[in-house]
Image (tube, helix red, strand yellow):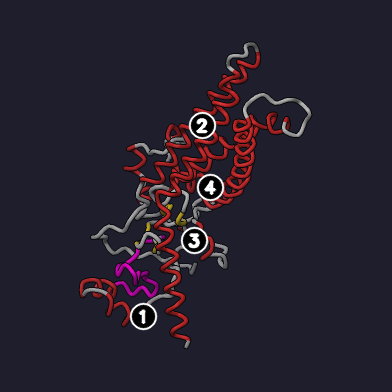
Amino acid sequence: MHRSAGVAMAWNVFRFCTALRGLGSIMILLVLAIVGVTYYAVVLCNYGPALLLGGGATLAALVVLLLFHFLLAMLLWSYFSVVFTDPGSVPPNWNLDFDEERGETAPLSSSDFNSQMNPQQSMALGDTGNPRMRYCRKCNQLKPPRCHHCSVCGRCILKMDHHCVWVVNCVGALNYKYFLLFLFYTFLETTLVTLSLLPHFIAFFSDVEIPGSPSALATTFLTFVLNLAFSLSVLGFMIMHISLVSGNTTTIEAYEKKTSPRWMYDLGRKKNFAQVFGNDKKYWFIPAYSEEDLRRMPALQGLDYPVRTDLDGQEL
């Protein structure tokens, strides 16, 4: 009875993961649809026509439209960078280099390791003497430091943070910066839209006659509500990730180490920030890295992370 219940739960989880994979292009189309509705309301219904009014109204409309298009371009650049950038996979011939952190699963016994790995891997494991070496039973491979298995993607992801349905991809070592920039520009864009449409929204509840067709007015009302909701929700999400970056941790790791006050990868806010955004300030606000940062900072590749020297030899 207990075994059948476990099998049923595993089957339900598999169906859930399969459903998330199936969302794919639907979520991308949904994001583009929201962008399209917002563009129609801001540019075509309100601030585009305001350019013809002359005087201060024209100047205000020009400023809003320039900011709107700049932030929209950065938002879409960051969004598609997250969508199309591989978050990071374990290389086929990854050299065994075990970390000291606790994995998200219980450590395997020697018999478990030996039964699931080839002789060369078993010999390497036997030479280390490390009781907390991490192994993925689903991928049948060893896991680098900070690597976790994603049931939706069906593979291990380097420095996995979470699987995001909005970007139809995992957020990991190689696209985490792009995801943070997507949040940042989404917050700025939705805030700009909310503030720019606020006078029009207030006018709905006044006795002033509002120019425009019923469809344009309805779209403006809907756009204001949507962007206000996204602005507030993204702000909370962004604050959470700012806290994670400052502590050099991920969403998964924050849950795993919730009982431990010390974290071996916390090198201080400045170095923690650099491990996500790089050292070159010119690249901080665009979804890209300088070649020098990629060459000199192994952490940006997702396989090797420096640790705190003051915690050497201490259990974490």
Residue drawn 45% across the image and 63% down it: 312
Mark 4 or mark 1, which is nearer the start of the sequence? 1
The residues tagged by marks 4 and 2 sit, at their Cα atoms, a distance apart of 27 Å
- Asked whether the residues under the numbered discs 3 and 4 touch, taking CB atoms below 8 Å apart as contact, a structural biologist would say no
Left or right, 224 with reference to 150:
right
Element type where label 1 sits in the image: loop
Which residue carries the number 2 mark? Answer: 71
As drawn, 231 above or below 60: below
The residues tagged by marks 1 and 3 sit, at their Cα atoms, a distance apart of 24 Å
Local packing at callout 1 (Cα closer than 10 Å; few below 14, some 14-19, many 20+) is few
Q: Nearer the viewer, residue 91 or 291?
A: 91
Which residue carries the number 4 mark? Answer: 269
The residues tagged by marks 1 and 2 sit, at their Cα atoms, a distance apart of 52 Å
Local packing at callout 3 (Cα closer than 10 Å; few below 14, some 14-19, many 20+) is some
Mark 2 or mark 1, which is nearer the start of the sequence? 2
Local packing at callout 2 (Cα closer than 10 Å; few below 14, some 14-19, many 20+) is many
Q: Which residues are magenta?
A: 128-146
Which residue carries the number 1 mark? Answer: 109
- Asked whether the residues under the numbered discs 1 and 3 touch, taking CB atoms below 8 Å apart as contact, a structural biologist would say no
- Measuring from the top left, give residue 105's x and y in whole percent: 43, 72
Left or right, 316 with reference to 236:
left
Q: Quadrant of residue 98?
A: bottom left
- Measuring from the top left, give residue 42's x and y in whole percent: 57, 29
Which residue carries the number 3 mark? Answer: 252
Amino acid carrying label 2: it is Leu
| Residue 135 magenta-highlighted | yes
